[in-house]
Image (tube, rainbow, N blue to C red):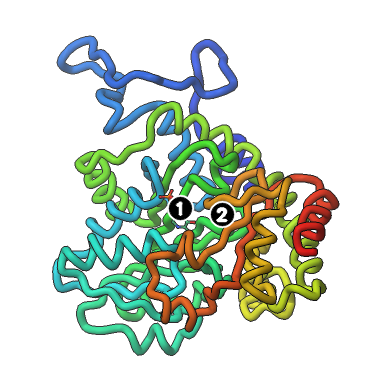
Amino acid sequence: MKNKSKIDTKCVHGYDYRESTGAVSVPIYQSATFRHDSLDEGTGYSYSRLQNPTRQALEETMAALEGGADAIAFGTGLAAMTVLFECCLSPDDHIIATEDLYGGSIRLLRTIVQNNGVQVDFVDTSDIGAVDRAIKKNTKAVFVETPTNPMMSVTAISSVAQLTKKHGLKLIVDNTFLTPYFLQPLALGADIVVHSGTKFLGGHNDTLAGFLVLRDTNDAERMRYAAKTIGACLSPFDSWLLLRGIKTLAIRMERIQGNALEIAKFLAGHKRVSRVNYVGLPQCKGHDIINKEASGYGGMISFEVDSHKTVRSLLEKVELISFAESLGGVETLITFPSTQTHADVPEAERERRGITDRLMRLSVGIENISDLIEDLKRALE
Ligand SMILES: *Cc1c(COP(=O)(O)O)cnc(C)c1O
């Protein structure tokens, strides 16, 4: 049933859980351990680091949404990636990653992963030729984020997948920005999908979570083993919050996208705004690829204002919109990437990539669009 239904139905009914009391909402199994009746009899559950019924319902939902063989839930997105890199990469292996990656992912690759003896190269993966040229004898994986944070550069997943298949590499996609509601990387040829569940999936700026979704059952088995060994699993309560968040993913994403399009158009026509990066705008470089591979544009916008003075006054004057890090929730948030999310990127590299002291990033929420535009209009005056 769940495999045949449409994605918005899967958001609500993505798991097989049946409760003997008839409870419609999956209960929060706040239990660390599970009793066995005898040496040969068990319920399938023993200890919540390994399995927990609430987390299992969430994992089934994520596997159904992304079309994977299995999904594993973690305490954060970075915990998911740590387990992933631990499983995929050994000393002297090489990984290629999108250069305009989430700041925390860059930090993980540049410190823990590199310190383990893995070679890491950051390339512009929107340029397929550049990815091809970066492949070496010891390359094991290509890690793609699309659209990127904060420059909204778009990578054609199916083109990269042709390369990774040819060379026998794993293609990993961070699908945090578009979510399975708009983009399904496994169907386009990716092997593994990574998520920060903290963002659109949870959707309410109230909890941290992360996911790995695996196309291949062997990968799933190895990663489940690493997940239980490392112990970075999602708690029963946070699993429930994620399940609850995902139930409204479809309607939130539609509303967020509608608001984002209006805001992007408003910003593009404002005299203090010199550039708008939103993949829903036809003038955005990745627009055509998104139209081919995804079913929507999401809610992330970055834009450049005329001076750093405007940045300061905008951040001070917004009232409805909060000046805060993170993204993907029902509340509209504005951030300043160069000293917030991307502070760890060296200044010269930030400048080269366009992460200047005039660049702002918006995560559009579900508020009324005229209130949001009014807030921006007043704050930009
Ligand atoms: C936030 C984020 C992460 C990291 O996730 P956490 O849940 O904060 O650990 C990874 N990738 C992207 C694109 C993100 O936005």
- Comparing 235 with 350, the one in front is 350
Q: CA distance from mark 1 to mark 2?
A: 8 Å
Relative placement, left or right, of 95 versus 20 is: left
Q: Residue at x 72, y 47 (%)?
A: 319
Q: Residue at x 58, y 37 (%)?
A: 245
Q: Is the Cβ of the residue at disc 1 closer than 8 Å to that at disc 2?
A: yes
Residue at the spot of label 2: 179
Q: Is residue 133 visible?
A: yes
Based on the displayed image, in which of its 4 quarters is residue 260 positioned? bottom right
- Comparing 34 with 350, the one in front is 350
The C terminus, quarter of image = bottom right
Q: Position of residue 20 (x, y in %)?
A: 49, 13
Check the image and report above or below for 364 versus 336: above
The answer to which of marks 1 and 2 sits earlier in the sequence is: 2
Q: Position of residue 293 (x, y in %)?
A: 60, 69
Check the image and report above or below for 378 versus 284: above
Q: Three-letter amino acid code at disc 1?
A: His
Tell me the SS state at disc 2. helix
Quadrant of ligand 1: it is: bottom left
Relative placement, left or right, of 196 versus 255 is: left
Q: Position of residue 121 (x, y in %)?
A: 31, 78
Q: Three-letter amino acid code at disc 2?
A: Thr
Does the numbered disc 1 mark a residue whose Cβ is under 8 Å from ligand 1?
Answer: yes
CA neighbours of label 2 inside 10 A, class few (<14), some (14 to 19), many (20+): many
Tell me the SS state at disc 1. strand
Q: Is residue 154 visible?
A: no
The N terminus, quarter of image = top right
Residue at the spot of label 1: 195
Based on the displayed image, in which of its 4 quarters is residue 377 positioned? bottom right
Q: Residue at x 66, y 43 (%)?
A: 330
